[in-house]
Image (spheres, grey):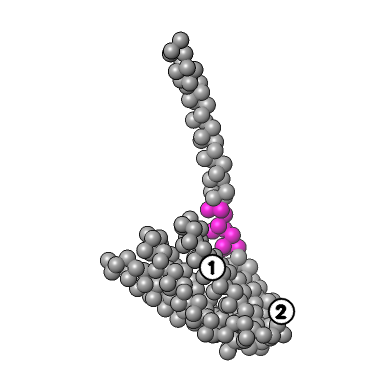
């Protein structure tokens, strides 16, 4: 009688095989979406590039394409920069997502204001001083992430968005919308992204103790 409870809880070979199959099924379902994204990400990117190239060949669609690119680039970049913080501890996750959303909001205010002057008040809501402060916070947040053992490119992503938001209000022309947006992206990538990458790497090295 004393051995009876132990015999009841001992798994049978059939139940072990069933648990193994269920565990494999659960794993497949959890990874199905990730596998789907990985499989179609590159074809979707090529399709988007072809669509943008095609739209740029028509005068009627070039201004719309320029506006779409200018607004979408900060969203994509800051989303990528904030993604590593989703798995961080709560306070670091809040800091990373908060800085990314702050940079995005300030950048989009100035970009949308440059593309559509009728929206007004962009100069009041997105002054350059706030952009520089947001950029400094992005560098600091990347340093905190490095101290926690994370890899992040938040500073470089924020740098591109900030540089584009600084460039367009000063240089955007309706008569050459596509050209000025393209020039702004080049300046943003090399000046803003390069500066953010360098300063973020230096801050991360300092946060790790100079190793």
Is 38 magenta? The answer is yes
User: Which structural element holds mark 1?
Assistant: helix
Q: List x then y, in percent, for residue 177.
A: 63, 83
Q: Quadrant of the C terminus?
A: bottom left
Task: Tell me what residue is drawn at x 72 percent, y 85 percent.
Answer: 118
Q: Quadrant of residue 143?
A: bottom left
Q: List x then y, in percent, for residue 75.
A: 58, 69
Q: Residue furthest left?
A: 211
Q: Quadrant of residue 52?
A: bottom right
Q: Is residue 152 left or right of residue 45?
A: left
Q: Which residue is mark 2?
A: 60
Mark 1 or mark 2, earlier in chain: 2
Q: List x then y, in percent, for residue 148.
A: 38, 60
Q: List x then y, in percent, for residue 174.
A: 66, 87
* Residue density around tag 2, few if under 14, some if 14–19, many if 20 or more, within 10 Å: few
User: Which structural element holds mark 2?
Assistant: loop
As drawn, the label of residue 98 is: 1
Q: Is residue 114 left or right of residue 189?
A: right
Task: Tell me what residue is drawn at x 47 percent, y 13 percent.
Answer: 4
What's the magenta region?
37-47
Q: Closer to the camera, 50 or 127?
A: 127
């Amino acid at each position: 009688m004393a051995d009876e409870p132990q015999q009841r809880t001992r798994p049978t070979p059939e139940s072990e095989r069933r648990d193994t199959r269920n565990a494999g099924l659960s794993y497949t379902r959890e990874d199905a979406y990730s596998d789907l994204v990985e499989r179609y990400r590159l074809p979707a990117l090529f399709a988007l590039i072809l669509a943008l190239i095609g739209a740029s060949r028509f005068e009627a669609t070039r201004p719309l394409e320029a506006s779409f690119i200018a607004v979408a680039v900060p969203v994509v970049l800051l989303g990528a920069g904030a993604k590593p913080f989703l798995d961080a501890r709560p306070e670091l996750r809040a800091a990373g997502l908060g800085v990314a959303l702050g940079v995005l909001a300030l950048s989009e205010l100035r970009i949308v204001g440059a593309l559509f002057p009728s929206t007004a008040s962009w100069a009041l809501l997105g002054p350059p001083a706030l952009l520089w402060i947001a950029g400094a916070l992005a560098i600091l947040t990347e340093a905190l992430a490095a101290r926690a053992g994370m890899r992040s490119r938040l500073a470089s992503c924020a740098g591109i968005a900030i540089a584009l938001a600084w460039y367009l209000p000063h240089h955007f022309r309706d008569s050459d919308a596509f050209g000025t947006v393209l020039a702004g992206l080049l300046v943003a990538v090399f000046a803003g992204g390069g500066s953010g990458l360098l300063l973020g790497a230096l801050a991360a090295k300092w946060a790790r103790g100079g190793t």
